[in-house]
Image (cartoon, rainbow, N blue to C red):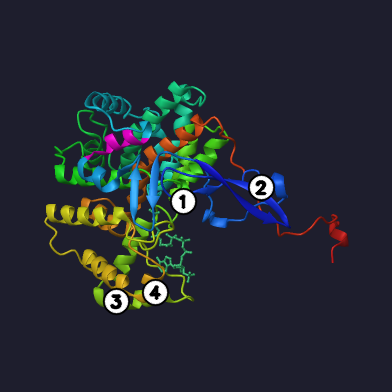
Amino acid sequence: MSSNTTLTVDNKAVELAVKEGAIGPSVIDISKLYAQTGMFTYDPGFTSTASCESKITYIDGDKGVLLYRGYPIDQLAEHGDFLETCYLLLYGELPTAAQKADFDYRVTRHTMVHDQMNRFFTGFRRDAHPMAIMVACVGALSAFYHDSTDISDPQQRMIASMRMIAKMPTLAAMAYKYSIGQPFVYPQNDLDYTSNFLRMCFAVPCEDYKVNPVLARALDRIFILHADHEQNASTSTVRLAGSSGANPFACIAAGIACLWGPAHGGANEAALKMLEEIGTPDRIPEFIARAKDKNDPFRLMGFGHRVYKNYDPRARIMQKTTHEVLSELGIKDDPLLDVAMELEQIALKDEYFIEKKLYPNIDFYSGITLKAMGFPTSMFTVLFALARTVGWIAQWSEMIEDPSQRIGRPRQLYTGPAERDYVTVAQRG
Ligand code: ACO
């Protein structure tokens, strides 16, 4: 459904179409505004701008709702598994048993990486950040799989998508193994997706490794929580990169680079570091005061969100998962969890955080959980990238399949010098 609204610019009335979504705010279509008025709109940070139409993920930030293809995140996390979520995001519906078995089989068949990729790794220093390795290796996949880079061919797009979902755990585990000087562990395809990943990370050739099913289920749920989040910075990066016709491996590499930033996917690493820095609950007031101090750049990491102005629904599930993992591992008293829970309680009652609607986001508890599972902090964002790959691919595919898709090309408000003549060095004062 659509209606119209009128905007008056320089005493001239301009008719603009208002488009309604299935749920959520309507949008004013300004695509013809420049042609009609000679003016651009100005919205740095895109706080009021819908960059595309999408059928994949819906967020109601005020109510704290997150839906993948209409299904609430808590139901998917409780009852589903990650590969089923991948199928849902990619194809729009939950799979039947036969579709699921076929999808799992197809993903599993692509888990190995080209053996030449091993040499690629040895070019990195051992202390390289695994996100740096991921950006490089995922981008490099386009140099290995020439048969799936033609984006105009739906079959090639599908194979590229499968390859990335399947190979991300293998590459992520290799990045980890390389950093600790252990040999790479090949995928074992009779294991489920997440158990296979845990084994590739933590098994060594000289010992048997048994996957702990509670930890595998918890990590699988963490992957579900991170699978997609509509037009966030990294997804928008993937869409923008893809809009030029770049190959899918290059686009996902761009998404990984964007995710690395501490305001985005890097926040789980930053949140854990902050909890470690706080150390004991008695130091919390000092850090709360710093977060509130306008002259101090410090922020409570894992707090606040551009869209959620209520409790992040993923943070609730994450908190429950943290307790399950710690209890399975017999960790009765984790000082970091004590600090986190106390910090959350204090912040939620503090006028500053209430007024600005700052609630814990998914990253607040994920670091504690991943650390307890044995992952070093540098791997946290890598795990996020692994899970978000399916969301990036689903969004990229949706864009490529949209017949109205054009290259993304934002405009600007120019505030630099007006035209002026070149002056030779000798003439410059
Ligand atoms: N601690 C203290 N104050 C905060 C915090 C915080 N974590 N987050 C926002 N604020 C304050 C800001 O100082 C600002 O105050 P002001 O209006 O007085 O200037 C106000 O709240 C609004 O903040 P903005 O930065 O304008 O909000 P924005 O929507 O641009 O940023 C963001 C959202 C980046 C997530 C921010 O809340 C933040 O930096 N949080 C910490 C990092 C973090 O946890 N990131 C993870 C995001 S979730 C994800 O990517 C999976």
Nearer the observer, 66 or 251: 66
* Residue at which label 3 appears: 283
Whether label 2 lies within 8 Å of ligand 1 gets the answer no
Q: Are marks 1 and 3 in contact (CB under 8 Å)?
A: no
| Alpha carbons under labels 1 and 3: distance apart | 42 Å
| Alpha carbons under labels 4 and 1: distance apart | 27 Å
Q: Amino acid at mark 2?
A: Leu
Q: Identify the mark at residue 352; answer none if there is no mark.
A: 4
Magenta residues (range) = 80-89
User: How many labels were placed on the picture?
Assistant: 4
In the depicted structure, whether residue 280 falls above or below residue 102:
below
> Is label 1 in a helix, a strand or a loop?
loop
* Residue at which label 1 appears: 25
Q: Are marks 4 and 3 in contact (CB under 8 Å)?
A: no
Q: Position of residue 286 (x, y in %)?
A: 34, 78
Left or right placement of residue 78 versus residue 382 in this view? left
Q: Identify the mark at residue 33; answer none if there is no mark.
A: 2
Nearer the observer, 127 or 90: 90
Q: Are marks 4 and 1 in contact (CB under 8 Å)?
A: no
Whether label 1 lies within 8 Å of ligand 1 gets the answer no
Q: Position of residue 326 (x, y in %)?
A: 16, 56
Q: Residue at x 58, y 56 (%)?
A: 43
N-terminal of the pair, mark 3 or mark 2, is: 2
Q: Residue at x 22, y 27 (%)?
A: 97
Name the dominant secondary structure of the magenta segment.
helix
> Is label 3 in a helix, a strand or a loop?
helix
Q: Amino acid at mark 3?
A: Arg
| Alpha carbons under labels 4 and 3: distance apart | 18 Å
Q: Position of residue 187 (x, y in %)?
A: 26, 32
